[in-house]
Amino acid sequence: MKLAMWTYEGPPHVGAMRIAASMTGLHYVLHAPQGDTYADLLFTMIERRPSRPPVTYTTFQARDLSASTADIFRSACREAVERFAPQALIVGASCTGELLQDDPGGLARTLDLGLPVIPLDLPSYQRKEHWGAAETFYQVVRAFAANRERPGTIDPVSCNILGPTALGFRVRDDVTEIRRLLESEGIDVRVVAPLGASPADLARLPDAAFNIVLSPEIATPAAQWLKRSHGMPIVSTVPIGIGATRDFLAEVRAAAGLPPRPPGAEAGRDRLTWYARSVDSTYLTRKRVFIFGEATHAVAAARIATEELGFTVCGLGTYMREFAREIREAAALYGVEPLITDDHLEVEDAIMAARPELVLGTQMERHVAKRLRLPCAVISSPAHVQDFPARYAPQMGYEGANVIFDSWVHPLMMGLEEHLLQMFRSDFEFNDHAAASHLHPHPQFAPDPRPKAVPDPITAARADGADSVAAVDIGTLWTSDAERELKKVPFFVRGKARRNTETFAASRGIRSITVETLYDAKAHFAR
C-alpha cells in the first residue's frame, strides 16, 4: 500500500539501473517479470532522457513459471550482447525475479559471452535504491580497477569526481560547475564517474592523485575501496553553499599540495552573500524552515539556512537510514529533533507540528506544503520532471549558491506578497474591484471600498477635544513589545499596518495595543 501511495526510494535494482543509465558501454540484464519495465519511465519521462536506459528485461510471464525461466535469462543475455555490443555486462534480478532463485550471475558465467560479466547480489527486501546504486558502482569499480597498477609518478593536481549519477538532483549541472571551479584552481579532472564514464574509464581511476566524492550516498564505498587498495585520498566536503564551497576548495588544494588561498580571495565570486544582506532579504531573517530529503542535501541545506540566510531550522530529517548518524549530528547543532523515516505521513505530521514558514524537501514535501499553503522549494531527489530543468541550474559551487538563493527566497517573497494583499484587501488600491494601479482609473472598476461603519480614531479624537486626543496618542497606545513586533513589518507597509491596528483597537475600545491586538487586527483585515 505504501508503494501505491508514495515511496522515497525504489528497490535496489532501480539503483543498479541508475548506474547503467549513467555509463556508456555498460549493459544491464535484469531478470524480471513482465511489468517491471515501469522503471524506464523514471529516466525517459521524469529525467527527460532522449533514449531508454541500457537495460534488457527477461520479462517472464506466469505461464513461463511451469518451464525453465533460467533458459529465458540465458537467451536474454545472448541477445543483449549481440544487439548492443557492450564493453561489459551487469546481471541481476528484480525484487520479484529474486524469488525464483535462478542465480543470474552463475547462469551468465556459463555462457562464455566474451566480455566481463559482473553479477549483482542486491537483497530487494532488505535494501533500497541508493544502497543498490552504491553497491553496483562499487562492484563495477572493483571489477575494472582491481588489477590496475598505480603509476609510479602521478601529477599531484590530478583528481577524479565520483558520485554523479542519473536521476540525481541537478547532477548534470553540478558536474559542469565543479569541473569549471576545479580547472580555475589548476586542478586536472581525469575521470567523472559513473556519469558519462565507460568501463575503460573506470580502469583509469588509479591514475589520478585523489578522488572527490560529490555524492556520498553513491560513491563512498567505491572511494573507500580505492583508498584502501591504491592509497588514494578522499575529498569528502560537498560544495553546496558558500561556506561549504570554500571548505571544499581548501580541502582540494590541501590534497593537491597547493598553498591555501589568502583570506578574502573568494570575495565577490557569488551573489548570495550580498543578496542575503540586502534590504529585500533582511526582513526574512529568522524565518522558520523545515528540511527533509536526501541526507547530503538536507545537511547542506541546514547549514546554508542558518549560516548564510539567517533562517532558523525548526525541523531536519532524511528518509535514508544509512545516514541517520549524520542527520542526528546536524540536528543536535540546531537544537531540533532528528526525523529519520521513509513514511511521508510522519513527515507531514512533523511539518504540521513544527509550523514552519518555509519547507525544503523532496517532491512529496512540495505536495504537503501546497496542501498546507506553505512556501516550498525542492532541494533533493526524489524529484519530478520540473526539477530537471532545461536551463543551467546547479546546486553546487558559487553559481549553485545563487540558484539556491533564488529557489528558496522567491517562494517566501511570493508568500509575503499574497499575505499583504489579503491583509490590505479593503484598501482602495488592493481591493478585488480596483483596476491595476498603472492603468487610468475608471469609475466602474474603482468604487470606494473603504468601510463607513468604523470611524478613524485619530480624526474622531481630535473632534472631541484635547483630552480625547491624548487618550489615543500613538505613543501611549502601543506597548514596547507591540512596537518591536510592528518593526518586523516591511517599511513600505508599516504605516498602513499601524493605522489599521489603531482603527481595529478603537472600534473595540482597546486602550493599550499589545502584540495580541496587532495579530487580531491582522486576522480581522485579512477576512
Image (cartoon, grey):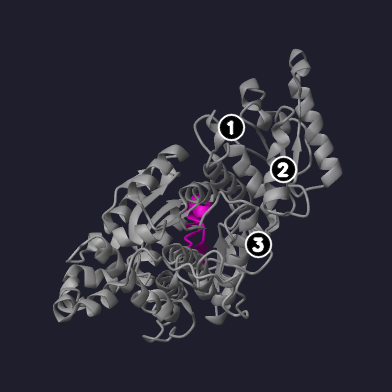
Q: Mark 2 points at which residue?
A: 40
Q: Is residue 221 magenta?
A: yes
Bin the neighbour count of mark 2 within 10 Å (Cα to Cα): few under 14, some 14-19, many 20 and up: some
Name the chief secondary structure element in magenta.
Answer: helix
Q: For this rendering, which residue is in front, 362 or 238?
A: 362
Is disc 2 in contact with disc 3, using a CB cutoff of under 8 Å? Answer: no
Q: Mark 1 points at which residue?
A: 4
Q: Circle 1 sits in a helix, a strand or a loop, which is it? A: helix
Q: Residue 389 carries which label?
A: 3
Residue drawn at (71%, 28%), measured in percent from left and top?
A: 107
Is disc 1 in contact with disc 2, using a CB cutoff of under 8 Å? Answer: no
In the displayed structure, would residue 503 be above or below residue 332?
below
Residue type marked 3: Pro
Q: Circle 3 sits in a helix, a strand or a loop, which is it? A: loop
Q: What stretch is highlighted in magenta?
A: 210-234
Q: Does the magenta stretch include residue 160?
A: no
Q: For this rendering, which residue is in front, 138 or 324?
A: 324
Q: Circle 2 sits in a helix, a strand or a loop, which is it? A: helix
Labels 1 and 3: the sequence-earlier one: 1
Residue 116 seen by the camera: no
Residue drawn at (67%, 50%), measured in percent from left and top?
A: 46
Could you tell whether 386 is left or right of 299 in the image? right
User: Where does residue 258 sit, x and y in percent of width and height?
Assistant: 45, 80
